[in-house]
Amino acid sequence: MDARPQQAQELRRQIEWTLARAIDPADVLPMLHRLSRVADEGSDESLFALLHLAELLVERDPWRAALFARRLLAHRPDDDRAWATLAFCQTLLGHYRYAASAYHRALATAPKNPWYAHNLGHLLDVALNRATDAVGWLKRAYDSASYSGEVASSYAHALARVGELAEARKVLTRAMKRSASREHAALLRWLELGAPADKDHPVPRPPPAHAIAVRPHEAKEKAVRRGRPRARDKRPLDPAAAPAPSANRTSVALELDAVLGRGLASLPLDTRQRARAKALARDAATYVDEFSSARGSAAVPSVDAIAAAVAYAIVYVDHVPLTQSEVAACFRVGVASLRARFGQLRAHLDITPGDARYASRV
């Protein structure tokens, strides 16, 4: 039997194992480069390497990331993640018409993705000066993710540029009631002036809308779990048998609930996913108890970082197309903090992709 395919499969398993444990995704770049060389062109392992290389390199080296995305699309022309990553590469490189075309291709495969629609609309409005064409895409994004302040501001900006000032103020004011920012305040001042073209408010560059790079191989996960005891039984616990929560856990749970609610307002999660996040946060309070008991109360981790980890856990469970950096930004924490807390929380609660306790698609 040819050793190369077997070697490629083993290397892919190592990469998936590393990513699944919330280690910095950039740490696997050398392994991904090696896999792209070892795997046969067009094989599942080769395409896996190309996609992850494109997604991980998109912001630090968009030209190289674009090359990887194009190689993937040569074999898999309907891959929305590859098209979205290529679109973002071209945005960063200043090739705006090419980027818009790539976002159109991503949306043809994943028409319900609000971030693809948002980034396309933002690009048409700000970079290509086609606000009339942008409004429809931004409305589609807003209808699916009205809780996102970023989507709301982009939609309000485009509405103002086509003369819909009253609707723009309504959209922006609603967003500011949930989570105001300096950017929102500046945009509102511009709207109050009548949205003059010579003082156009600069809407921030759209974020990358590629999907999560971390998607553990479920068969591998099951094999790993068979070799160790479960951290927590997934069956509901008997409330009568559960110990009373400590005062510290109650205090942390209340603070965590408040911080989580604010952060979730900026993420494209539906009502059911938010409810699952709240349930996961209640279970996460036990993690804080054990952490502080083992290391002392002074070592209790940041509630903001825990809230970000809880939100990302829902992203991880439901395969929502968001990166760790996109989630971390909504909670104003560093990606490293989110990654560390998510890794610990995932191990403590034995969270898996599609986890029946927290998934909204069961």
Image (tube, rainbow, N blue to C red):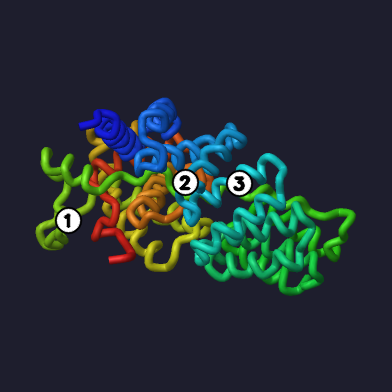
Taking the spot 42% from the left edge, 43% from the top edge, the residue there is 213
Q: In this view, does 166 lie to the left or right of 6?
A: right
Secondary structure of residue under mark 1: loop
Quadrant where the C terminus lies?
Answer: bottom left
* Residue 140 x, y percent position in the rendering: 59, 69
Could you give the CA–CA distance between mark 1 and mark 3, rounded to whole angstroms? 39 Å
Res 13 quadrant in image: top left
Residue lying at the far right in this picture: please name it.
Answer: 198
Nearer mark to the viewer, of 1 and 3: 3
Marked residue nearer the N-terminal end (1 or 2): 1
- Above or below: residue 224 compared with residue 357: above
**Disc 2 crowd, CA 10 A, few/some/many (<14, 14-19, 20+):** many
Q: Mark 1 points at which residue?
A: 234
Q: Which of 74 and 264 is in front in this view?
A: 74
Quadrant where the N terminus lies?
Answer: top left
Secondary structure of residue under mark 2: loop
* Residue 251 x, y percent position in the rendering: 34, 50
Q: Which amino acid does label 3 sit on?
A: Phe
Q: Nearer the viewer, residue 316 or 239?
A: 316
Could you give the CA–CA distance between mark 2 and mark 3, rounded to whole angstroms? 14 Å
Marked residue nearer the N-terminal end (1 or 3): 3
User: Which label was assigned to residue 69?
Assistant: none
Q: Which amino acid does label 2 sit on?
A: Thr
* Residue 64 x, y percent position in the rendering: 57, 33
**Disc 1 crowd, CA 10 A, few/some/many (<14, 14-19, 20+):** few
User: Which label was assigned to residue 323?
Assistant: 2
Q: Can residue 255 be seen in this view?
A: no
Q: Name the residue under label 3.
A: 88
Taking the spot 43% from the left edge, 54% from the top edge, the residue there is 260
Residue lying at the far front in this picture: please name it.
Answer: 1
Nearer mark to the viewer, of 1 and 2: 2
